[in-house]
Amino acid sequence: MLQRNPHVSQTHHDAVTMRELRTTLFFSVQDQVGALDECLHALKAADVSMTRIESRPSKVAERGYDFFVDIDARTKELVECVVEEIKRVKIVRDVRIVSSLGALESLGGGEGSQGLDQQVPWFPRKVSDLDTFAEKVLEMGEELSSDHPGAKDPVYRRRRMEIVQKAKEYRSGQPLPHIDYTEQEKDTWRQVYTRLRDMYPKYACREFLHVLPLLEQNCAYGPDNIPQIEDISRFLKDCTGFTLRPVMGLLTPRDFLNSLAFRVFHSTQYIRHHSDPYYTPEPDCCHELLGHVPLFADPNFAELAQEVGLASLGASDEDIEKLATIFWFTAEFGLCREDGSIRAYGAGLLSSFGELEYALTEVPTRLEFEPSKTVEQKYPITEYQPLYFVADSFRDATAKLREFNATMKRPFQVRYNPYTQSVDVLNSKDKVQHFARSISNEMQLLASALEHV
């Protein structure tokens, strides 16, 4: 859940402190007796504590293994000491660090490896790494600002805390939390759902209108029921591979965008205060489930969203702000052309009856979606947008975004592996060759398929 607030351009130390104390060390070893023991002895020699270790068949060392080890190394000097100790082990093919302290760096020892001159912020490498975001929210969640409609309602606050606690405790692989919504909460949902549902045929894009009835059929969407994210997540995974996971409140832009790389969308489960069902100062389940969810079932939009996410992995703070701006003007407040007319596809529009109607009048300015220009655009966060960007299609927007991403300063490329739900960093000759072989296999399959069409 990303809602652009003043936090977008600031550093939020509280949200990342715990991750900064962790360093994840990656190394590859040849398969021989005692190989891991030698590496662990090297860690012991460096006098660091190991908190996690994982292994898998190596993508670097032939007939070897890749290891991921979390260590408690709080200074760059200590991290470098550990790396030097590991490099002394003769059977080690490669040593890399994934950390907010030292970044993703190739530190020698690997054939075909190339060093990264820049420091790169920590980023998740596999979907379970998103668990590190569970308690790192910027605002809202269980804490409400003084101007929130529910701030002085102790019953509402207790209810929010109950729902937020379930999100806080959730970890990858567990069943998504089930919320037994109260009649009052259902009534709030009913008012929002009914009013927006009547407006969609006139204002929403065709992809949205195609998916919404499917959500009603498969996920119990309707005026009298707030759907469960477990049912929705299962439906989305069947459609595009996207899944939902609960979140306590607003994430940092970096964390939120990083999750999209894994086709994961963080969704709140609490609902706005009943006293004003047509207003919320923060994303709630009405915004998430009505605004965002339907288009995550569309393959072309899902590709666009993931492209933003992949570009955010290891990106600089400056580039994160640019990508967050792109997300704002596409997934949150995007417009598109459709059969000679303009339609809405942004969640901020599709979950707000007032701005949905306003955005398609002649009052606001409309510009062609061009990422290089979009990222420079400033915008208000507490009033209707004075300007919207219009895309010709999701495919066209994705193509333009890829061209823009190629100009970013990140010193490596990444690819998402849907089989392992992990990210491969293409920063060595071995990895690029492996990727090239997989592309060659896909091209052979494509050629064979074309022969039978």
Image (cartoon, rainbow, N blue to C red):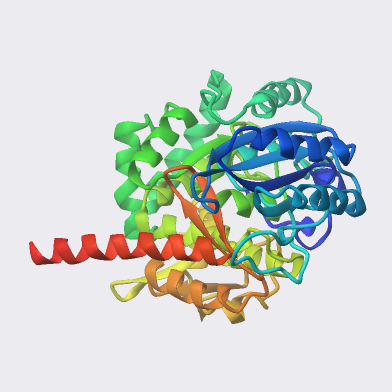
Among the 4 quarters of the image, the one containing residue 309: bottom right
Q: Position of residue 418 (x, y in %)?
A: 43, 47
346 or 404: which is nearer to us?
404
**Quadrant of the drawing holding the C terminus:** bottom left
Does residue 192 appear in the picture of this structure?
Answer: no
Residue at the spot x=55%, y=40% of the render?
A: 31
Residue at the spot x=44%, y=61% of the render?
A: 435
Q: Is residue 169 left or right of residue 246?
A: right
Q: Position of residue 179 (x, y in %)?
A: 55, 21
Does residue 263 appear in the picture of this structure?
Answer: yes
Q: Position of residue 80 (x, y in %)?
A: 85, 54
Among the 4 quarters of the image, the one containing residue 168: top right
Residue at the spot x=66%, y=44% of the render?
A: 280
218 or 170: which is nearer to us?
170
Q: Is residue 127 left or right of residue 12?
A: left
Q: Is residue 167 left or right of residue 332?
A: right
Residue at the spot x=54%, y=18% of the render?
A: 180
Q: Is residue 72 above or below residue 171?
A: below
Among the 4 quarters of the image, the one containing residue 333: bottom right
438 or 213: which is nearer to us?
438
